[in-house]
Image (tube, helix red, strand yellow):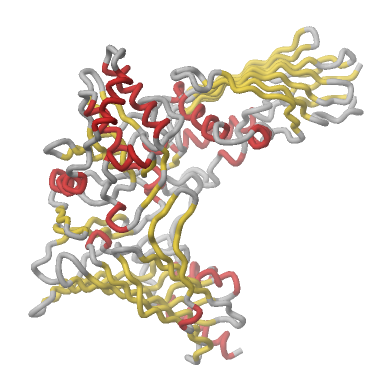
Amino acid sequence: MKNKILLSFVLFLIAENCLAQFDSKINFDSLVQKSDAFVLEDLTEIEIYDEQSAEYTIKEKILVKNNKGDKYCRKILKESHFIEVEDISARMVSLEGEIIKELDSDEIEEAEFSVGEFYSGSNHKFFEFKPTQYPFVFEVEYKTKINSLLFWPSWEPQYKIPNEKSVYKISINPDIKFKYYSKGIDCNPTKMGSSSYDIYTWELKNIPPVVEEDFLPPEDNVQMMLYFEPEIFYTDSYKGSTENWNEFARWYRNLADGRYSLPENAKKEIQDLIKDKTSTKEKIKTLYKHMQKKSRYVDIEIGLSGWQPQSAEQVFANGYGDCKDLSTFMIAMLDAAGIKSYPALALTRSGGVVNTDFPSSHFNHCIVCVPLEKDTLWLECTSTYDDMGELDYNIEDIYTLVIDTSNGTINKTPQKKSYQNKWISTIDASLNSLMDLKINSTITATGNQKNYLNDNLARMNSKDDIQFLTDLLSENYSNLNIDMYNLCDQNIEGKDYTITLNGIYKKFLPSEATRLFVNPSLFNRQTAEDLPKEEINKRKYPVYFTYPYLDADTVYITFPKYYSLEAKPSDQSIENDIISYKTKYDLTDRKLFFVRTFELKKNYITLNEYPLFYDTMKKIIELDKSKFVLKKN
């Protein structure tokens, strides 16, 4: 009873401090009452001594009400060549102030992080409390030393639970210049000065949880943030600047200096490969395929190698490398063929969007830019299967920093249109007396839909291939058994990706029914899972899909002669700036005919476009439930 009284008193005090700092419609007290845990306070204090090093302390206090809040009683802290975590302490404290448990040093575990072909050279320290009584306050504090200001921690005061108070404090040598940009935070710092430090403090209260919506754009996963960058930074002995993009490009250019040379035997190999090629694009295509065959992607990020590429000579000798290593190798090969190309630093679309007005280190990938007379080619060098110039959706429509011999230029990669990401299927099917549906199907795919199929099928054995295809084609009807499949011409560049297969949907319809209700959308159909849960006027952020696309399915189903048509759906046509949808239904001589086309014309739906998108999708979901009605004679 005493615990309940104290908890109620804490909640009352929090409610008294609710100043509706963000959205007047948000009742912070209500959020706290409903949450399984909430943050009483989080504090980040960073001290920056010089242009090469700093240390910061994190303190958190979280009130956990019940076992659903246990996930907030664990921490995973990353270390690397540039980051060292020390002085970790944590404890559970009752609402009366009594210590329930303190973290023992033996409970802090450590592990290196490597997954598949990724070797980061990083270490993780982690621990977890397993509470047995509630409520309590979880307190944690740790210090981190960094030896490059590229790791200056951002301020992200928003959690998945309410946060009563967040403070970010910088004590910095006045000679060190820095900049920051804000997202979702309208809060100016207080500034104080001393003989050796300038002190900046930001403070927020009554911070609502992160808004979680369906199909959220990656850049909106973090909705409140201050991101900091030093004007001057060091990575080991390499000095860099974020004054402008040219200066930042100079830093990478220095890291890669002298690493684009190839040995003479490699140059001769290149000349032999292109000796019969007459056009520049033919030469690029030949060397790109050669790079794909000769090398493989292995991500190695140990220390400075997280930014500095291996030399082209090393990649040639070893036959592997990460994105910047393989890009360096590709640039060197093209240079040996007399073709100029440049590295392009990129932030993959899954990581968000680069702020082009804020020169910074927010890149996680590297590709190759090849300027040609009439257009520009972009080469993804980590892919084993992509055709020359064909980009994965994750690096389409993104800003890159192209680093030529003297400048750094922001350029945007192209994005394939919906009609370039096609899925076209033809299904010839028949119902037997047991109401099993036998199918013969041809599926043709282009663009990102082709890449999805190729990436999943090219690496697997036949057993895995069948399982993948079974799962893919069973989303609308289960009990699919694939008897045979064939991949046609998948290695011919520029050729559409084609799959033929035979199979049977067991128990497709009830065998003893006097009426059959047949939905002919066998492969593709819009369902409630494709519609955001947020209704119109309740959505707060845009809607994002990985790419625009076009699905076109043609279905023929022959049914037994003792059934006749009783009713069929009406043909449909919907056309707007976001979606195109068309269906056609018919039945002749016991053969049901159905054509369905669905086109998502754009993959980023703004809030202004959301009402049209939502209403259209809701209507299509209902239309995709349409069925033929067949009556037993």
Q: Residue at x 60, y 73 (%)?
A: 67
Q: Residue at x 85, y 25 (%)?
A: 435
Front residue of this view, candidates 600 and 55 = 55
Residue 563 in sight in this render: yes
Residue 206 higher or lower than 511, as above or below: below
Q: Is residue 284 left or right of residue 73?
A: left
Q: Residue at x 34, y 63 (%)?
A: 80
Residue 605: give x, y in percent of width and height. Answer: 42, 37
Residue 317: give x, y in percent of width and height. Answer: 34, 40
Front residue of this view, candidates 543 and 82 = 82
Spot the residue most to the top: 589
Front residue of this view, candidates 305 and 87 = 305
Spot the residue most to the front: 265
Residue 571 in sight in this render: no
Residue 108: give x, y in percent of width and height. Answer: 47, 76
Residue 550 higher or lower than 163, as above or below: above
Front residue of this view, candidates 541 and 106 = 106
User: The N terminus lies in which quarter of the figure?
Assistant: bottom right
Can you tell which quarter of the image residue 113 is in? bottom left
Residue 68: give x, y in percent of width and height. Answer: 59, 69
User: The C terminus lies in which quarter of the figure?
Assistant: top right
Q: Is residue 409 left or right of residue 451?
A: left
